[in-house]
Amino acid sequence: MNAPTLNGPALRGELRLNEPLARYTSWRVGGPAQRLYRPADAQDLAEFLSRIDADEPLFWLGLGSNLLISDAGLAGTVIHTQGCLNGISQLPDQAIRVEAGASCAKVARFASRLGLIGAEFLAGIPGTMGGALAMNAGAWGGETWPLVRGVRTIDRQGEIRERGPADFRYGYRQVRGPAGEWFLGADLELEPGDTEAAQARIRELLDRRAATQPTGVPSCGSVFRNPAGDHAARLIEAAGLKGQRIGGAEVSPKHANFIINLGDATASDIAALIKLVQDEVERSSGIRLQPEVRRLGAFA
C-alpha cells in the first residue's frame, strides 16, 4: 500500500503497522495486522480509503466479538471503528442515529434513557452496531434489522451512501446487500415507552446473561447458530462436550454454545475445538452445526 499521507492533506486518524490483534478481539487471540487504521471520523475514513490500492485486502473490526483471527494474522489493512466511529444521537419521531463503532450495550442504554423501547435486547450483544448490522445480531427474541429505518454505507473508494432496508435482505444471523460496501451507521426506529421499565428490562436481561453465560472470561459469545427447532447448546451438551478442551480452549461448563479461552488458547486451538464439536454433534444427532463466528486469515 502506498503511504496514506501522499497526494493529499494529512490524514487525522491513527495508522499502526504490524499491530497485534489479540488485544482487539474478545477471544484474546489472533496474530498481527499488517496495517491497522483508526479513523478520526467518517470523512477521514473516506479519505483514507480513497488512497489505498484497489487490491488491498480490507477487514473491519469493532469490539472483535464473533471473530476468529488466525495466529498468522492478516495481510492488508484492518479498519478499527470501536472508540472512534461511536456517535449516538436522538432523531425526531422516536428514532436514534448510531455509528458503526458504538457498542450495542451503549445503544440500548441511550435509548432507554430517552424512554424509547425495543432496543433493550442489544444490551446483551457483546459487539458494536457495525457487526450487529452485518449479521442481524439478536438476543432474547430481538433482532437488529427490524429496527432499521435506514443505513449509511461506505465503499473502498470512500464513497458514502444512504440506503434503505429495501436494499438489503436479512434473516437469522445473515444480511445480504450491495457488494463492496460496509456499514458506517444506521437510524433505528423505536417506540415510546417508560424509561424506568426499559432500564429494568435491561437489568433483567443482563442478570439473566450473567447467570447463564460465562461472562468475565474471553469468549466470542455464541459460537454456533441454533438449528431450526432446536438449540445448539442443547445438542452440544447432549453430545457430552461441556468442559471438552483442546489446548487452552474449552467448551464452557456454564453454557455449551460458548468456547472460552482459559488464558493460553491459540486461534488454532479454538478452530480445532469448533471442528470437534461439529463432528461430535453430527455423529450423535445427525445435525451439522453452523458457526456464527467469522474466520479471518489462514487456518490449517
Image: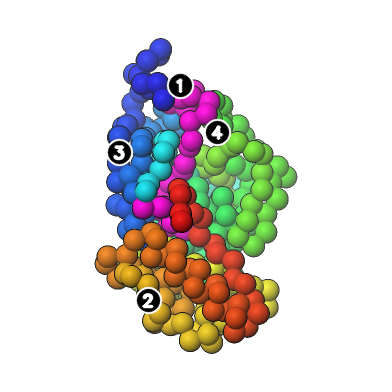
Query: Disc 1 residue type?
Result: Arg
**SS class, disc 4:** strand
- Earlier along the polypeptide chain: callout 4 or callout 1? 1
Q: Which of 232 and 158 is in front in this view?
A: 232
Residue 268 seen in this snapshot: yes
Instruction: State how far apart marks 1 and 2 are (Cα).
Output: 45 Å
Location of residue 104 by image quarter? bottom left
The disc at residue 245 is 2
Query: Disc 3 residue type?
Result: Asn
> Can you say which quadrant of the picture contains the N terminus?
top left
Q: Residues within 10 Å of mark 3 (few under 14, many from 20)?
A: some
The disc at residue 154 is 4
Q: Residues within 10 Å of mark 1 (few under 14, many from 20)?
A: some
- Earlier along the polypeptide chain: callout 1 or callout 3? 3
Query: Disc 2 residue type?
Result: Arg
Residues tagged 3 and 2 counted as in contact (Cβ below 8 A): no
Foreground tag (2 vs 4): 2
Foreground tag (4 vs 1): 1
Residues tagged 4 and 1 counted as in contact (Cβ below 8 A): no
Instruction: State how far apart marks 3 and 2 are (Cα).
Output: 30 Å
The magenta-colored residue range is 47-71
**SS class, disc 1:** helix
Question: Which residue occupies 55% across, 64% down?
Answer: 291
Q: Mark 1 points at which residue?
A: 51
Q: How crowded is mark 2: few (under 14 residues within 10 Å), some or many (20 or more)?
A: many
Query: Disc 4 residue type?
Result: Ile
**SS class, disc 3:** strand
- Earlier along the polypeptide chain: callout 3 or callout 4? 3
Q: Is residue 14 above or below residue 143?
A: above
Q: Name the residue under label 3.
A: 18
